[in-house]
Amino acid sequence: MTTEQIAYHDLCAYTLTRGDATFMHQHVVDAFAAQHADEHSKPMGVIFALIGLYLSCEKGYSGRQVQRVHMLLARTKSTWPNLVLPADRGRSTAVHVMAAPAGAERDHAIHAWCASVWAALSPTRRTVTNFLHEHGIT
């Protein structure tokens, strides 16, 4: 495993054991999935990650709210868009997040990571918002 993958797994353990009502873990999953998507990634997983980042960063959705949107969309028969993602996926990574002390600082680092990834992937915004609109969300 790479350092990045180890940091992601450690971060998942951190967020899953928190038991917070906002379910911050969803943001971690979405940021990592979007940042590491490649030609082998399933289109559904990529669009879900981007939707999660959009809803979190631009609409202020909690992880729990994002999870509910994902569950609604998973029940639909959809053609998942194939997206061409830019090579730059943000400067912040799971490694940076895990370097922050546990608690409020790490939680802030998670949100900063999500914002960094979403900003880098902003060329996909129109596709994401159109997809959500087509499915009656936001």
Image (cartoon, grey):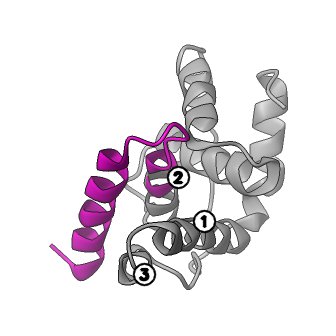
Mark 1 is on which residue type?
Answer: His
- State the CA–CA distance, disc 3 to disc 1: 12 Å
Residue pictured at 67% horizontal, 65% vertical: 118
Q: What span is in magenta? A: 1-28
Residue pictured at 54% horizontal, 22% vertical: 71
List the residue tagged with mark 1. 111
Q: In the image, is residue 7 part of the stretch drawn in magenta?
A: yes
Mark 3 is on which residue type?
Answer: Ala
Whichever of callouts 2 and 3 sits on the residue coming sooner in the sequence is 2
Q: Is residue 136 visible?
A: yes
List the residue tagged with mark 2. 27
Q: Residues within 10 Å of mark 1 (few under 14, many from 20)?
A: some
Q: Are marks 2 and 3 in contact (CB under 8 Å)?
A: no
71 and 19: which one is in front? 19
Residue pictured at 46% horizontal, 57% vertical: 28
**Residue 9: quarter of image:** bottom left
Kindly give the residue lying farthest to the front in the view shown: 103
List the residue tagged with mark 3. 100
Q: Residues within 10 Å of mark 2 (few under 14, many from 20)?
A: many
Determine the secondary structure under disc 1.
helix
- State the CA–CA distance, disc 2 to disc 1: 8 Å
